[in-house]
Image (cartoon, helix red, strand yellow):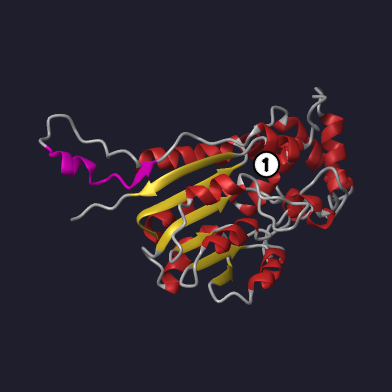
């Protein structure tokens, strides 16, 4: 969760920047600029010959990046990180980065702005798009999708146990009045959910699921991680912060698979060099979680997980 403003502190900021092992003249990518918290910290460690490129799909993030426009070391592109492969190709950046940082999920400024429609705690338009300049809103999708499709999204992306019940209620209620507001949806979910958790609003999982679906978040992560292997130099660092189990599962699986040789049929004679040539990443640490002090200061950091890997390239 990126932010440069005092009320929105980037999660695992010092740990993430340390994991990048910044070289003063290095080239780095902040693939999720947000409000610039991580970018600011990286720029503070770069020398005059260093370079930082950032991406973000949110027009408000692009506007916030104007605060960095005076710095010749910095450039930002209004693109989702899922299009990293295209950016690499267009800007001729293959093998150019000493480090890449992903700070996944929705940012605090997005959650706190009722007009963005991400939060069930604040009534606003049922939008949920990270890029408000394009794509289908959550309301558009909920008002047209079939019940089984909605239920599948809630189940897969939200791990919602009452997905079918909620989906049927959405389809029923929209016939009387189309969904347009976050409170309208949150109230429906609260009404039809038979079990209440005093520590969690009944709409929590459904809002997460709909947001992930509308923004294709998990597909974006998979595409971006694959592209990072092309973007990184030998010894370049891949640093990823995730905020829920679905994200972290993808990151963990990707790093594990990229750090292991491909299976070879039993009985084939192979050398160690041949066996290891498919290894693309080296895992550098166990998963890092925020300190108790950070969680106390910023409760949204509680579920965050930081994973680090190093790019390995083999001579052909």
Q: Does residue 283 appear left or right of residue 271 in this picture?
A: right
Q: Nearer the viewer, residue 188 or 288?
A: 288
Residue at screen point 45% across, 62% down? 85
Q: Give the range drawn in magenta.
A: 270-283
Q: Where is residue 190 in the image (x, y as percent from the top left)?
A: 85, 33
Work out whether 14 lies above or below 169: below
Q: Residue 22 magenta-drawn?
A: no
Work out whether 259 lies above or below 202: below
Residue 159, picture quadrant: top right
Please tell me how many numbered marks the rendered image carries.
Answer: 1
Q: Where is residue 163 in the image (x, y as percent from the top left)?
A: 71, 32
Q: Nearer the viewer, residue 244 or 174?
A: 244
Q: Position of residue 247 (x, y in %)?
A: 56, 41
Q: Does residue 285 appear left or right of residue 185 in this picture?
A: left
Q: Does residue 151 appear left or right of residue 252 in this picture?
A: right
Give the residue number, with chain letter if any, for mark 1: 209
Mark 1, residues whose alpha carbon is within 10 Å: few (<14), some, or many (≥20)? many
């Amino acid at each position: 969760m990126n932010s440069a403003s005092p009320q929105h502190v980037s999660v695992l900021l010092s740990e993430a920047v340390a994991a990048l092992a910044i070289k003063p003249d290095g080239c780095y990518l902040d693939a999720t600029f947000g409000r610039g918290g991580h970018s600011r910290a990286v720029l503070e460690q770069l020398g005059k010959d260093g370079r930082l490129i950032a991406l973000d799909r949110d027009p408000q993030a692009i506007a916030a990046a104007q605060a960095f426009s005076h710095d010749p070391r910095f450039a930002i592109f209004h693109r989702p990180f899922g299009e990293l492969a295209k950016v690499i190709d267009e800007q001729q950046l293959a093998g150019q980065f000493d480090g890449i940082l992903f700070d996944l999920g929705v940012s605090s400024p997005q959650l706190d702005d009722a007009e963005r429609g991400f939060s069930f705690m604040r009534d606003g338009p049922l939008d949920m798009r990270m890029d408000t300049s394009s794509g289908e809103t959550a309301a558009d999708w909920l008002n047209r999708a079939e019940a089984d499709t909605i239920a599948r999204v809630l189940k897969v992306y939200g791990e919602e146990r009452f997905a079918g019940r909620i989906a049927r209620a959405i389809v029923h209620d929209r016939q009387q009045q189309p969904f347009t507001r976050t409170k309208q949806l949150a109230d429906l979910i609260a009404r039809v959910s038979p079990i209440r958790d005093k520590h969690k609003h009944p709409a929590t999982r459904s809002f997460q699921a709909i947001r992930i679906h509308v923004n294709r978040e998990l597909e974006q992560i998979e595409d971006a991680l694959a592209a990072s292997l092309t973007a990184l130099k030998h010894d370049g660092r891949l640093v990823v912060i995730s905020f829920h189990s679905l994200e972290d599962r993808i990151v963990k699986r990707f790093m594990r698979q990229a750090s292991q040789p491909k299976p070879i049929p039993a009985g084939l004679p192979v050398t160690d060099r041949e066996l290891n040539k498919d290894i693309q990443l080296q895992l550098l640490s166990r998963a890092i979680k925020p300190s108790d002090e950070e969680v106390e200061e910023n409760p949204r950091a509680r579920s965050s997980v930081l994973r680090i890997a190093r790019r390995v390239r083999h001579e052909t």
